Each structure stands twice: as C-alpha cells, then as structure tokens.
Amino acid sequence: MASGGDSLRVEDPHATGVDDVLAALSVDPDTGLSHPDVLRRRERHGRNELGAQQKVPTARILLDQVRSTVVVLLGVAAVAGVLIGEYIEAAAIAVVLIVNTVVGFVTELRAVRSVEGLRGLASAIADVEREDTRDEIDAVELVPGDMVSLEAGDRVPADLRLVEVSELTVVESALTGESDPVEKSLEPVDTEAGIGDRLSMVFMGTTVQSGRARGVVVATGLATEVGQIASMVDQAESGRAPLQEGLDRLGRTLSIVVVGLTGVLIAIGLWRGLEVEEVLEVAIALAVAVVPEGLPAVATLTLTVGMRRMAQRHALVRRLPTVETLGSTTVIASDKTGTLTTNVMEVVDLVLADGVEEHVLWESAVLANDADLAEDGDEVGDPTETALLRAADAAGTDWRALRAGCERRAEDPFDSESKRMAVVVDRTVHAKGAPEVLLSGQEHARLARAAEDMGHRALRTLAIARRTVAEGEIADGTDPGPSAYEGLELLGVVGIQDPPRQEAVQAVATFRGAGIRVVMVTGDQPRTAQAVARQIGMDAAQVLTGKELAALDADRFAEIAGDVDVFARVAPEQKLRIVRALQGAGEVVAVTGDGVNDAPALRQADVGVAMGRSGTDVAREAADIVLMDDDFATIEAAVEEGRRIVANIRRFGQFLFSWHLGIVLLIATSLTAGFSAPLAGLMILWNNLVIDVIPSFALALEPGREDAMEDRPRPKDEPVLGRGTLARIIVQGVLIASVGLSAYFLALGPLGLPLAQAQTTTFVAVTTAQLLAVFNARSEHGSGFTGATRNLYLWAALGITVALEAAALGIAPLREVLGLELLPAGGWWVAAALAPLPLVLTQTVRIGRARARSH
C-alpha cells in the first residue's frame, strides 16, 4: 500500500483494488484534492517532469579529442621537432593535430538528449478535478492523488490507476512494443504482470485510442514508468568503439617504441664515439619519423567518408566511430514492432464463404466500421478497422462513395465483452466480430477451421456477416441488441496482422551468412513474436518472456541470453539487461528500435540504431545511427560499410607502418654497422608528410569487396592491425629497408658517390619502392592490381606524390633545404633497378599462392 514517511506512493497499484488505492492516496474521487493538499504533495514529490539533464560540458568534449595517446605522442613529436630546429616538420604535425582535433570535436559535439526527449512526453494538458471543480491545467502541475479524466485522442499525462472506464483502448506501442491498442478495465491484475498486461493502469506518454476514463494519479515525474526509463537511459553507457580502443592501444605501443628506440640509438651513437649533439639530432629526428603523422587524419577521413556513404543509403550517423563498430557487430538485438514489422495492421488472409463474392464481404466490412482514412493516408480510429478499409480499397471497393450513399439507421456498438458490432443500413444488417462469437462450429466448419488456422499464425481474426431485415423489424435510431445477430449470413473470415517487412527477411538471411546473430527483443505477446520470427527466418523454437527472465539468476540469465533468439513481453529494464549480458559474453551488440521502451538498450548498445520515420524522439536521441527510411535492410548496408572501413584501415595501416618500420630498420642498421645515416633528418620528415598522408588517403577510399558480407565478424579483442596485417607490415618493412640499404651501399661502394648523393640515391629508391608498394597494401591475397581502376583516387594520389617527390629533386631551393643532390646516371639506374623489387616479389608470391589454392 502506501509507503512510509511523507511520500504518497502505492505499491503495485495495478494489483490493488480501486478503493484501496484511493484510500492510500487520501483522495475523494468525487471531489478531488484540495488546494492545500496539492501544495503539500507538490512540495514532497516535485513537479510532474523528468528533471533537467546534465549535459556533457563542451570543454570535456574538446578534452576527449586530445587525450588519445597518438595525439599526445604527436604533440611531443612536434615539440621535439622544434627543439632540434625542424620547424617545418613541427608546423606540419601541429596542422595535422589541429585539423584532426577540430574534425573530431565537431563530429562528437552532441549532448546526451535522451532525457530531454523523454521530458517532451510529459508536456501535455490534464483534465483534472480539484475541490469538486474540473479544470484543464499543465500536466507538470499534477501530483499523486489528482483525479484525471481522459477521452479519445488524449495523451496520458501521468501514471494513473483507472477508477472509471467506458470502452477505453490505449495505444502503448511506444512504451511496450505491442502494436495493437490495449483494452483497459478496472479489475486488478497479478502483481508480477508486465507493463503491457497491467490493464488497470494507463501510463504517461501513451495515447487514448477510443473511449473515456477517469483515473487517479499514482506516480509523477521520475517515479512513472517513463521516468524510470529516463533514469535507465541516463545511466546506460555506450562502450568505446573498437577503433578508438585499437588506436589507443597502438598509440601506447608507439610511445614505448619511440622512447625505447631513442634510447637505443643514443647508446649506439655514444658507443661509436659520435658527438652528443649529432647523436641527439639523429635520434630525435628518427623518433619523430616513427610517429605516423597521418594516422589520425586518415582514420578520421575513413570514418567521415563511411558516414557520407551511409547517409546516401539513408543511414544518418550521429557518432562517427560507430561506423567502424558496425563492421565488428556479432549480434543485432532488434525490436519487433516498427522495426522488423511495418507497424501498420494489414489484412493478410481472407477465406470466403461458399458462393460469396469478395466485393460483398468488403461492403459489409467497411459499413460495419467506425474508422476512417484521410486522403494523405493518416489513420483515424482502430488500426484493425483501418486495415479493413485499406484492404477494401485494394480490392477495388470505393468505400468512401459507398458510405456517402448509405445512412446508418441503427447500430449496436462494439463491446469488448460481446466482441462484435452491427449497423443497420437501409434494410440490411452488416456485422463483424470475433469468429467464435459469430460462427457456428457445425454450420460453418470450413470457416471455423480457417479462423483457427489464422489464430495459430498469430493473426487477429474477424468474421464478416450480413442479413436482410423485415420492414419495421428494427426501429431507426435504436440499439438493436442481440436480435441484430440472429440469422446472419456469414460472408467470410479475414486475418489481420502487423506484417513483417519483406526487406527484413532478406536482411536476416544475409546477416546469418555474415556470422551475425539476429535476436528479437519485444514487449509484444509471445505468440505474435514467435509467428513474426518464423516468418522472417529466425530460430523461434524457444520464446522466453520477461516474467520467465525475471526468475533467473545472473549466471542463468547470461546463458539464456546467448542461446535464445526470441524474447517477448520484455520490460525496458530487461532489454537493457539482455544487452549487457550479451556484451559481457564478448559480443559486439547493435540494438534497433523505435519506441520509448527501446531507449535504454539503444544507449547501452555498442551501436544503437533507431527508426527515423516511425521512431520516437526518445529513441532517435538515444541512438548512434538513425535509419531515415525505416528499412531494416539499411542496417545490412551499414554493416557492409563498416566492414569496408575496417578493411581500408588495415590497408592504409599496412602501407603507413611498413614505411615507418622500413625507415627505422634502415637507419638503425646503418648506424649499428658504423655508417652515417642513409637519409638526412629532413629527408625522412619530408617523406613522412608526403607518403603518410596522400597514398594513405587513397587506400582509405578503396571501394568495398562484393563478398564482404560473407566474412565472419572481426573478434572484439582483435587489434585494429591484426596478426596477419602485422606480418605483412614486417615483411614489407624489411623489403623497403633492404632496398634502402642496397641502394646506399651500392652508391657508396661500387659507384663511389659522396655521402650526399648516396643519401639521395637511397631517398629515390625507398620513396619509389614504397610508392609502388601501395598495390601490395590493396589486397591481402592475390593480385594487388585487381579492381585498381575502380579507385580513381589511387591514381590521383600516385600522380600527386610523384609530382611532389619530383619537386623535391628538381626545385633547387627545396632540394637544398632537404639536403638532396642531383644524381649521376649510375644513381638513377641503381634506384630504378631496386625500387620495383618489393612489389614484384610480393605480387609473384601472392599470385603463385592463389593459383596453387585454385588447383
């Protein structure tokens, strides 16, 4: 009953009788609360609103952009560049840092608005009775104990225990996920009943479909069901995207490498007796060269391009790193209503009685019907009745003209207990109702079997009938009552449901082939959930309800979450718990939904995907991605784009880090062997700027493979640059270093070139070798030239890079700054002979392996 202290709160009002609830709230239902009572209760409970959301400060968002280890390392590199006098390199790194930070800040600048969206649900007018006077007030002024009246079209302003009901139906799909309007009553229900089964209650944010009611406010603000969802949304935390985690791990590794390498080179130089200043200059220059200046910029570009491509396919990305996370998704937990289904009731089956023409049935179905369809398609009335109107229209029945030419003489309105309705038009009774009410098992055995079959398929069934009445049998303007149903001629039975989206069927099959499990998590009835799951190709052998889940301990719950694909009658907190259990099992979870009840799970998920058209503001604000076409198949396109991004990150990662590794090996080997550095500091820094960024951008823009959705998802704990990519980085780095060392020693030895020209020969050889090696980075197996003509950016990047390197050699002032020299013919021949070797060797091995596998 009422809780202790000054707070007025009824425990389980849905399971408590009306009189006991009113007594616990100390209110007379006939007169309502007094003004002093209202003031005292508002002081105790506050206003009927969901409270102000704590927004993430702008400064914190900016700080998050510069807390990355890679960014910090780049900052240190820029400072080191200034200390050794390499101002150009330092300035270039600073520009990259600034651009990357600005892009990241802009894309991440969004406060958490989910609770604000929920607060909008409370913005309503309430028809309240106080001190024996009815008045309309702002719903935020309601307090527990207020008596509120409702009628068709009203939005429920707080959680109410019903005290009077007249044909009340309420649309609760946004809160519970159930598509059909819910018929309400006064009788208490079981204490353990879920939200969708609490027929004696109406909840904030839902909408009255038909009928009238009075109720007493039992919860306001954050104490309402919507308020509790708001609290869950606020508490749920989105995990960091795998790319973010991977880049941070990579940055930490790089920082160790940089520090360690610098120390080793300083020790080698001092051991060889070099000047301390010279040792420090070379060591710091090399350490700066190890840092991949282009990594943040290229990673950001990759995600941005992916975001734009997804926008072209009707998926609006609200948080950039989630684009990549989609490529690692292993489980998609989807709502049913409005996501896997259309959220529009349709007639999907029809069985006619013997000798009845279809148009006759539709005439009776639209005349015994109180709904309407606006010219723009908006529904007015019960969804089941609007489904009949659409079906009649599709069958060629001009129901608007038919209604205009007919006048109701009498009617027996639909009643939830009798489950039937009838109208009298001219001298004909048109009736519809539940098959078990209108059908006789003996007389209409075939129709009864058809209705039973439809019921097994979770269809809502209606029987349609008519009969001619005698003159004067039913008086105009009367309620004919039971006599209207005597002697009816049964016309047929229709089956109605919220049908699955056809595109969802294909998408589920594609996800299964891609190693992605689709799980249905809905607030709808188990029977309906199971039927829809079967229709879209899911494993629906076992269906668990929220009530069954509530009885499980944490270990058993986690086990069930990993095995069962269909969950029904699930409350919002249970959806959240399912997502957390899947994440705890190591899954990368994408959640799709459109209702208020989906918001906490959308926020908690690794990727939250909301429907843009049918979705609530709450769902859209909680999500990372919004589907503007409400097409479940768009998620398939988004996942495919995510996988393309992962592949491209690995492409440019292989290219970029193999270059840095090659230069490190080249310099370290030469110094260890007692030779001067094969490349001057500015030569290294120049090539970093040119080769890090331009070809890497082109690799980031590679089109995706057509068979990308045939691969298994990338494991969550797998690094961004996995074991295979690291192996290719090492092989390519060693090849580049070998080219450089060979060019350097041939220039110094057989050619007898001075140090500056030997360094220039090395510069040309390694630069050309790495540029050609871009084709090695394009593919992991087979020829790196396959499909190269599809990426025009690649050829543009090669052209620009060649032009910049030619400028470095051909423009005298730039050549002098970099320490380059004009080469004799021998130097050019050495560079030309050595540079293609990494490409030729790698492609020869890969093509040979591909042919061997094909045989």
Image (cartoon, rainbow, N blue to C red):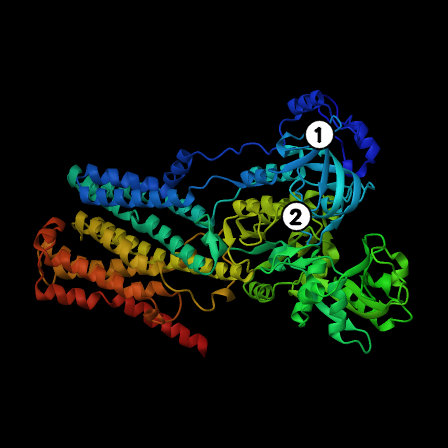
Determine the image quadrant of residue 465. bottom right
Taking the image as shown, residue 585 lies to the left or right of residue 9, namely: left
Taking the image as shown, residue 726 lies to the left or right of residue 451, namely: left
The residue shown at (42%, 76%) is 852
Q: Position of residue 777 (x, y in %)?
A: 34, 62
Which quarter of the rendered picture does the C terminus lie within? bottom left
- Residue bearing mark 2: 558
343, 91: nearer the viewer: 343
Q: Is residue 297 above or below residue 725?
A: above
Which quarter of the rendered picture does the N terminus lie within? top right
The residue shown at (53%, 53%) is 612
Q: Is residue 336 visible?
A: no
Q: Position of residue 111 (x, y in %)?
A: 47, 39
- Residue bearing mark 1: 144
Label 1: few (<14), some or many (≥20) within 10 Å? Answer: many
The residue shown at (31%, 60%) is 698
**Mark 2 or mark 1: whose residue is earlier in sequence:** 1
56, 121: nearer the viewer: 121
SS category of the residue bearing label 1 = loop
SS category of the residue bearing label 2 = helix
815, 221: nearer the viewer: 221
Residue type at numbered disc 1: Pro
Q: Is residue 812 above or below residue 195?
A: below
Q: Position of residue 497 (x, y in %)?
A: 70, 62
Q: Position of residue 150 (x, y in %)?
A: 72, 41
Mark 2 and mark 1 residues within 8 Å of each other at the beta carbon: no
Label 2: few (<14), some or many (≥20) within 10 Å? Answer: many
